[in-house]
């Protein structure tokens, strides 16, 4: 096997729906692309695009005034996001991850890290990766190292592991391990809004530091804060094996 993800990315020359085209160009997810099209911000050959529209090779696609094109080279980056950087594509946000990274090709993030959190963030121009990794029903692992404001107790670990009521639901059972008086690691298979902070808050703890150290097979490792690197061929091959049978559709779980 040799970079099946890259091969699939390069082979897509047939007409594609506009939402998928925008996703594969790294503009946004398909769901966000639908909202963008509905708002009238998408243009194809100078005309306002409609929902379900298919894009043929050679057509000009714009979002606002900016021409959008699918890159000939697939890019998947591991980024060590500092605290204070915001996962957004909003141009008015001065501290957005897009501005901070300033990568020459158009890439977008695969799942957010909140402003106050730091660590591993994946960025890519491959929309299929984004869609498959972001579907909660696919249960892909993400690992974090967390420091809280008071001593961790066995009761805290047990309740965190079993599931905590937040946001009108109960979080999935997860793996939690104490590694210090105030620190623990946690492995999640879902990504609710500010999930770890809310879980800790519900149990009377405040998160003081939160670092994402792993997404599936991709490790933060020794990547310095604020820096990025391209994924290796071995990492891409392993990633392909994990997501190739994953759903691209919305999964309720």
Image: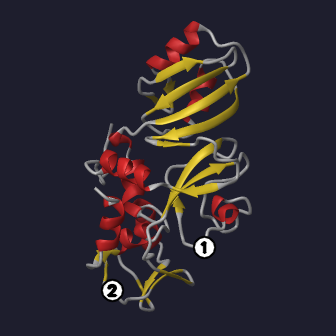
Q: Is residue 44 left or right of residue 211?
A: left
Q: Position of residue 128 (x, y in %)?
A: 36, 60
At which x and y percent is residue 115?
68, 47
Residue lying at 50% horizontally and 12% vertically, measured from the top left: 158
Local crowd size for mark 2, using a 10 Å CA cut-off: few (<14), some (14–19), many (≥20): few
Crowdedness of circle 1 by 10 Å Cα count: few (<14), some, many (20+)? few
Q: How is the image coloured?
A: secondary structure
Q: Quadrant of the N terminus?
A: bottom left
CA gap between label 2 and label 1 equals 23 Å
SS for dot 1: loop
Identify the disc placed on residue 104.
Answer: 1
> Which numbered disc covers residue 57?
2
Q: Which mark is nearer the camera, 2 or 1? A: 1
Q: Is residue 121 left or right of residue 13?
A: right
- In the shown orientation, is residue 175 left or right of residue 145? left
Pick the residue in front: 66 or 144: 144
Quarter in which the C terminus is drawn = top left
Relative image position of residue 65 (x, y in whole percent): 57, 84
176 up-or-down from 229: above or below: above
In this rendering, the answer to whether 211 lies above or below 70 is above
């Amino acid at each position: 096997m040799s970079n099946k993800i890259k091969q699939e990315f390069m082979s897509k020359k047939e007409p594609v729906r506009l939402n998928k085209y925008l996703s594969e160009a790294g503009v946004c997810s398909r769901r966000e692309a639908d909202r963008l099209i509905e708002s009238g911000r998408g243009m194809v050959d100078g005309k306002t695009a409609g929902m379900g529209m298919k894009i043929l090779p050679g057509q000009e696609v714009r979002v606002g005034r900016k021409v959008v094109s699918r890159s000939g080279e697939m890019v998947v980056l591991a980024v060590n996001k500092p605290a204070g950087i915001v996962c957004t594509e909003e141009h008015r946000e001065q501290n957005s991850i897009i501005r901070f990274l300033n990568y020459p090709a158009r890439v977008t993030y695969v799942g957010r890290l909140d402003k106050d959190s730091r660590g591993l963030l994946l960025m890519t121009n491959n929309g299929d990766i984004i869609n498959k990794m972001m579907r909660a029903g696919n249960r892909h692992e993400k690992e974090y190292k967390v420091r809280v404001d008071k001593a961790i107790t066995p009761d805290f670990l047990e309740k965190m592991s079993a599931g905590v009521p937040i946001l009108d639901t109960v979080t999935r059972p997860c793996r939690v391990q104490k590694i210090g008086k105030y620190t623990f690691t946690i492995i999640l298979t879902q990504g609710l809004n500010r999930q770890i902070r809310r879980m800790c808050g519900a149990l009377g703890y405040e998160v003081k530091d939160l670092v994402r150290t792993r997404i599936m097979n991709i490790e933060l490792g020794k990547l310095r804060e604020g820096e990025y690197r391209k994924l290796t061929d071995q990492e891409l091959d392993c990633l392909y094996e994990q997501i190739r049978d994953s759903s691209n559709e919305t999964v309720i779980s």
